[in-house]
Image (tube, grey):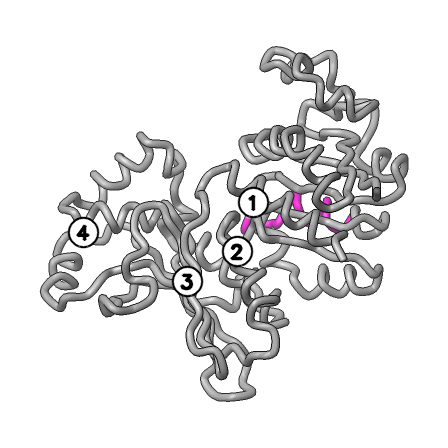
Amino acid sequence: MEKINIILVGFGHVGRAFFELLKTTYDACQFRYGLQLELRGIARQKGIMLLSSTQKVLSPSYFSEGELDNLDDWIKEITISDLLNEFNQGVLVDCTPSNLTSGEPGLSLIRLALEKGWHVATASKGALVLKPDELKDLAKEKGLVIKASAAAAAALPTIDVGQRALAGTEIMTMEGILNGTTNYILTRMAGGLDFNQALKEAQEKGIAEPDPSIDIDGWDTAAKMIIIANEVLDSRIKLSDVQVRGIRGINRDIMEKANSLNKILKLFGKCYQEKAGSPWKIEVGLALLERHHPLAMINGTSKGIVFYTDTMGWIAVSGGQSNPKGAAAALLKDIISIYRP
C-alpha cells in the first residue's frame, strides 16, 4: 500500500466536489490501486484547514455544511509552503479559478509545488496556456508531472485518448467541441431561440456564468485546445498564438442559413499543421459541419473531440459530465495515473 499525501487548494464548487469524491472513493482506491490517498490540508482564502487524520476526513459527521465554513477551523498563520514542507511530497490539487490574463493564483501555486518536489493535478487553465514552456521545463527538471485532465474538458478523456489510446499513430488534426455553455446556446438557437434568449436560459439553469465572456467569446475552448495539444502533440502553444472568435451576438439569420445548407453550426476548435513539419496552429470559431461529421450531433452541454490519424483513421470521443463532479473525477483519475504502474 502506497500512502499519497494530497493538499487541496481552492474550495469552490470543484474543490468541494473533489473533497466529497475523495471521501467516497477512499476505500476503493486502496483496494483497486493500492493507493492510500491522504488529504492533509485544504487551503482557501479564509486560511488553511489541517486534517490530522484520514478518520477525520472520512467521519460522516465531520464537515457538515456549517462546519465547512466555521472560521475557527481555518488557520491564517500557516501557508501552503508550510504544508508542502511538512509532508515532503505528494500531489497538490489546484482547484483555484482560471485566470487567462495573469494565470494566477495557479501559476504561483504550480511553480511552488514543483520547486518543493510535489506533483500537480490541476483544474485551472490559466498558467498552462500562458506559461507552458516554463512549467513543462520546470516539471521535467524536477522529475515531476503536471496532470491537467480537469482543465481539458474534465470528464471527457481528451488527453488520455490522445496520449495512450493513439500511441504509435501520427495525429494529423484534432477538432473539438469543448465548451458546454456555447454548445447549449447553439443547440437552443437551432431549436428556435435567439442568442439572448438562449443565453438567459443557460444562466437560469446554471449552465452559463453570470459573466459568460470567457465561454461565449471562445477563450475557454481555446484554452482547452491548447492544453490538449501541448500534452498530446508535445507542442508549446500559448494563448497569444491562437486565433479566437466566439459566438457573442450571433443572429437567427446565421442559424437559418445553416439549416438551408443542411449543416450544423458549432463553436469549433481545430489544431492542425499547414504542412508536415510546420508548427501546430489552433483556431477557434464558428464552423458549419456536415451532418455526417463525427461531432455534428454533439448537442446540449455535451462535448466531444475527434483525432484524425495516419493509421487508425478518425477516432471520436464524446460525453462526460459537464459539472463539478466530472471535474473532480478527472482530478482523481490524474492522481491515480501518476502512481499506478
Badge 3 or badge 2: first in the primary sequence: 2
Rate crowding at label 3 as few (under 14), some (14 to 19) or many (20 or more) other CA atoms within 10 Å: many
Q: Which residues are magenta?
A: 100-112
| Residue named by callout 1 | 98
Q: In which quadrant is the C terminus drawn?
A: bottom right
Quadrant (top left/top right/bottom left/bottom right) for the N terminus: top right
- Contact between marks 1 and 2 (CB within 8 A): the answer is no
Instruction: Tell me, yes or no, whether the highlighted magenta stretch contains residue 266.
Output: no
Circles 3 and 2: CB distance less than 8 Å? no
Give the number of the disc on residue 190.
Answer: 4
Residue type, mark 2 in image: Pro
Q: Residue at x 63, y 48 (%)?
A: 333
Asked if disc 2 and disc 4 are in contact, CB closer than 8 Å, the reply is no
Answer whether residue 230 is visible to the viewer in this image: no
Q: CA distance from mark 1 to mark 2?
A: 20 Å
Q: Earlier in the sequence, mark 1 or mark 2?
A: 1
Query: Which is more foreground, mark 2 or mark 4?
Result: 2
Can you give x and y, in whole percent of width and height, for residue 16 in the image? 59, 29
Labelled disc at residue 176? 3
Q: Position of residue 55 (x, y in %)?
A: 78, 21
Which mark's residue is nearer the viewer, 1 or 2? 2
Instruction: Look at label 1 and name its amino acid.
Output: Ser
Residue of label 2: 157
**Spatial distance from mark 1 to mark 4, Cα to Cα?**
30 Å
Residue at position x 20%, y 48% in the image: 189
How far apart are the two marked residues, 2 and 4, measured between alpha carbons? 27 Å
Above-or-below relation of 46 to 33: above
| Mark 3 → mark 1, Cα distance in angstroms | 20 Å
Q: Which amino acid type is shown beneath numbered disc 4?
A: Ala
Give the mark, 1 or 4, whose residue is nearer the N terminus. 1
Q: Earlier in the sequence, mark 4 or mark 3?
A: 3
